[in-house]
């Protein structure tokens, strides 16, 4: 029998992090995370390490309802080091998931750093969905100020104020609104990808509306390596 699950996490942190993570779950209801992180550090070191700060992560799940994340991150660092490293700050990350309803992320990131070293993905103020089927609304609202998001390693991906979807099916609305000021988004490695204030959809079937509004000021978006790609204030559908 399927169970209705309501998960709510609320935290104001001086030293630490907050995240909601679901693996191989069947969720019907509301997943809500509200995080205020100030002058803190969250670090994962080792093979397949993951560091999550002010983030909702859903993997291999079926979700009917609302997935909501609201994060305020100030003067903090989130770092993942090791093979397969992934660092998520003020983001929603979904892998092999089915969603019917609303996926919403609202992030305010100030003077902070999010770093993934050893391959993998660095997400800052972003929604990242892989192998997912979405019926409804995917919404991302990000304000990023004087911050750095860095991914290093083969196939590294860095997303700042972005929505990225790979091998996805979308029926509904994909919306991204990003304000990026004096910040840097960097991906280094063969096949590296850097997305800033962008919507990127690959190998996808989209029926509905894709909307992107980006205000980028005095910022840098850099991808370095053979076959690398950099997208700033763009919509890319492949």
Image: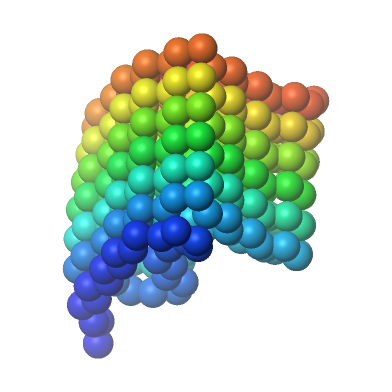
Q: Going 59% across and 18% down the picture, which residue do you hit?
A: 220
Horizontally, is 48 left or right of 201 in the view? right
- Toward the top, the furthest residue is 218
Q: Quadrant of residue 19?
A: bottom left
Q: Going 37% across and 23% down the picture, which residue do you hit?
A: 179
Residue 166: percent from left, percent from top: 50, 42
Q: Going 42% across and 53% down the picture, which residue do you hit?
A: 37
Horizontally, is 57 left or right of 32 in the view? right
How many numbered marks are there?
0
Residue 196: percent from left, percent from top: 50, 25
Horizontally, is 176 left or right of 113 in the view? left
Depicted 180 relative to depicted 59: above or below: above
Residue 29: percent from left, percent from top: 19, 68
Q: Is residue 207 visible?
A: no
Looking at the image, which is closer to me, 207 or 218? 218
Q: Is residue 118 visible?
A: yes
- The way the protein has been coloured in the rendering is rainbow
Q: Going 43% across and 38% down the picture, which residue do you hit?
A: 109
Looking at the image, which is closer to me, 16 or 222? 16
Instruction: Assign the N terminus to one quadrant of the image.
Output: bottom left
Q: Quadrant of residue 175?
A: top left
Depicted 130 relative to depicted 172: above or below: below
Depicted 217 relative to depicted 2: above or below: above
Residue 129: percent from left, percent from top: 45, 47
Looking at the image, which is closer to me, 222 or 29? 222
Horizontally, is 26 left or right of 73 in the view? left
Depicted 140 relative to depicted 222: above or below: below
């Amino acid at each position: 029998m399927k169970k209705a699950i309501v998960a709510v996490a609320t935290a104001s942190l001086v030293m630490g992090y907050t995240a909601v993570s679901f693996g191989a779950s069947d969720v019907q209801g509301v997943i809500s995370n509200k995080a205020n992180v100030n002058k803190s550090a969250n670090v994962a070191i080792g093979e397949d390490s993951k560091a999550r700060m002010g983030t909702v992560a859903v993997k291999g799940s079926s979700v009917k309802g609302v997935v909501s994340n609201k994060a305020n991150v100030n003067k903090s660092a989130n770092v993942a080091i090791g093979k397969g490293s992934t660092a998520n700050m003020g983001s929603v990350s979904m892998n092999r998931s089915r969603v019917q309803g609303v996926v919403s992320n609202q992030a305010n990131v100030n003077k902070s750093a999010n770093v993934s070293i050893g391959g993998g993905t660095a997400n800052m103020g972003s929604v990242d969905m892989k192998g997912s089927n979405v019926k409804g609304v995917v919404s991302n609202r990000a304000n990023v100020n004087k911050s750095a998001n860095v991914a290093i390693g083969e196939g590294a991906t860095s997303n700042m104020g972005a929505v990225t979807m790979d091998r996805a099916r979308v029926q509904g609305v994909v919306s991204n609104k990003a304000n990026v000021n004096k910040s840097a988004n960097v991906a280094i490695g063969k096949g590296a990808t850097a997305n800033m204030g962008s919507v990127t959809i690959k190998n996808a079937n989209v029926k509905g509306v894709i909307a992107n509004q980006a205000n980028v000021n005095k910022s840098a978006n850099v991808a370095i390596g053979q076959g690398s790609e950099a997208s700033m204030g763009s919509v890319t559908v492949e």
